[in-house]
């Protein structure tokens, strides 16, 4: 049954603003699935993918601690998790890393990594009812109103802050529709070697066969964070979203990020140094989260999926504990695997020299599509910039630090030397519109 975007909801969104939207997106079930409890009782496959290392394909916890290394947190209940060094790609520890599970809205990272480079942030979109006919019943929404016009920047705020499925479908309409966008997302996942992932819809709403893994979601975050717009959106704690009206009379309301480690919550402190990335929830997936944080010049990625605890904050507490462990374990653990580079950046790849376009591409984004499939440092290795955005105690976005490379054999360049961003993606020093 398609989601009914009633005028009553749009009016409520404008009336209640941030608080109503954040609560709805954080705790409302996206799909009342009677088989959710059975799914939570499933065990990981005995044999899983070994991309990134043989140990990552084993069920259970994988860690190689030295004598002086801290112990992993003893209260972890997530069905699957991973903590990795974003700069080197080293996987410091993992638990069922390649278990294919329902991803919920963390899949929006792949959606953004695929679609975001295709549109300038000041391009405009006009909402039409038919664009939202395939939205799932009970979807989280930022409050897009039929007939109103929004910028692409507005829509990405809706995607990342309010986890709005309506914003996803608006961008999907701009991108040529659901079928085309899903095909591009699956193609992008294949390019990133995220082989546990199968996309059925662009927003992460529960669907038969829609799966990803902690490993793959971490790849999506690492890839997305190379794009300066992506970094900005995922680290933004709050923004104004357009409401009704025209011109100077148009109203707006504040939306706040549903990422509780970014903005905090009653009973949960904001995680210092966190710069995104994305949280999610559905009744089948449970609570899911991928985050990136910087401390003392070191950048870590963490993904946690479906803690046993029904507390919606449990996934954040476990992710924070894993980040704390990862920072404390620096130099005291041996990697159990690695985050692999995209296929086009592996030594035996042809590098995607011709910049092939996706099926059905009209050619408008040919340069950007080429950028999705190729990058080169001066020695032919893949070198990409990653500026980590932090948040001050007052909740304002500031530039924190960071940069990373895909291959451990490449030294981390100084920030001023990071000029080899992927073709077609906005450089960090590009003028803002």
Image: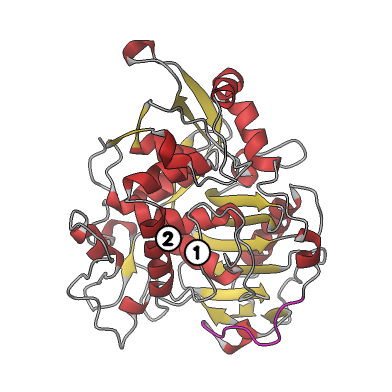
Of mark 1 and mark 2, the one earlier in the sequence is 2
**Which quadrant of the view contains residue 376?**
bottom left
Q: Is residue 407 magenta?
A: no
Q: Which contiguous range is marked in magenta? A: 43-51
Q: Up-down: is 394 above or below 85?
A: above
Residue shown at 48% from the left, 67% from the top = 219
Question: Can you give x and y, in whole percent of width and height, for residue 97 in the image?
Answer: 63, 74
Q: 10 Å neighbourhood of mark 1: few (<14), some, or many (≥20)?
A: many
Which residue is disc 2 drawn over? 182
Question: Can you give x and y, in whole percent of width and height, for residue 70 in the image?
Answer: 73, 71
Residue shown at 35% from the left, 15% from the top = 246
Answer with left or right where residue 365 lies relative to residue 195. Answer: left
Circle 1/circle 2 CB separation < 8 Å: yes
Of 89 and 371, the residue lying toward us: 371
Which residue is disc 1 drawn over? 199
Question: Can you give x and y, in whole percent of width and height, for residue 43 in the image?
Answer: 77, 76
Residue 225 showing in the rendered view:
no
**Which quadrant of the view contains residue 111?**
bottom left
- Circle 2 — which element? helix
Residue shown at 82% from the left, 67% from the top = 74
Q: Is residue 44 magenta?
A: yes
Residue shown at 31% from the left, 69% from the top = 383
């Amino acid at each position: 049954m398609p989601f009914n975007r009633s005028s009553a909801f749009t009016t409520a969104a404008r009336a209640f603003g941030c608080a109503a939207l954040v609560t709805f997106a954080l705790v409302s079930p996206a799909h009342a699935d009677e088989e959710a409890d059975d799914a939570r009782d499933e065990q990981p496959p005995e044999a899983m993918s070994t991309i990134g290392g043989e140990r990552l394909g084993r069920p259970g916890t994988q860690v190689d601690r030295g004598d002086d290394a801290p112990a992993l947190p003893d209260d972890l209940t997530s069905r699957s998790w991973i903590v990795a060094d974003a700069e080197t790609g080293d996987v410091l520890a993992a638990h069922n890393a390649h278990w294919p599970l329902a991803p919920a809205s963390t899949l929006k990272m792949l959606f953004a990594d695929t679609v975001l480079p295709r549109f300038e942030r000041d391009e405009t979109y006009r909402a039409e009812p038919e664009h939202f006919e395939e939205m799932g019943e009970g979807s989280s929404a930022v409050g897009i109103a039929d007939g109103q016009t929004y910028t692409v920047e507005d829509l990405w705020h809706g995607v990342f802050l309010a986890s709005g499925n309506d914003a996803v479908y608006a961008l999907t309409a701009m991108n040529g529709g659901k079928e085309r966008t899903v095909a591009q997302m699956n193609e992008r996942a294949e390019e990133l070697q995220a082989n546990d992932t199968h996309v059925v819809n662009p927003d992460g709403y529960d669907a038969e066969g829609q799966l990803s893994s902690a490993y793959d979601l971490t790849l999506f975050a690492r890839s997305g964070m190379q794009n300066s717009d992506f970094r900005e959106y995922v680290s933004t704690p709050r923004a104004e979203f357009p409401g009704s009206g025209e011109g100077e009379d148009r109203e707006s309301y504040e939306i706040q990020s549903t990422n509780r480690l970014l903005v905090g919550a009653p009973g949960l402190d904001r995680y210092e140094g966190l710069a995104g990335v994305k949280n999610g929830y559905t009744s089948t997936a449970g609570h899911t989260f991928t985050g990136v944080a910087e401390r003392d010049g070191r950048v870590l990625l963490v993904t946690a999926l479906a803690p046993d605890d029904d507390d919606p904050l449990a996934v954040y507490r476990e992710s924070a504990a894993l980040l704390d462990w990862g920072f404390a374990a620096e130099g005291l653990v041996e990697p159990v695997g690695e985050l692999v580079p995209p296929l086009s950046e592996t030594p035996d790849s042809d590098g995607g020299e011709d910049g092939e376009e996706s099926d059905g591409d009209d050619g408008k984004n040919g340069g950007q599509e080429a950028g999705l499939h190729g990058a080169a440092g001066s020695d032919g290795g893949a070198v990409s910039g990653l500026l980590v955005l932090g948040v001050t105690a007052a909740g304002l976005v500031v530039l924190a630090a960071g940069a990373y490379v895909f291959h451990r054999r490449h030294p981390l360049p100084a920030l001023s030397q990071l000029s080899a961003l992927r073709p077609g993606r906005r450089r960090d020093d590009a003028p803002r519109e």
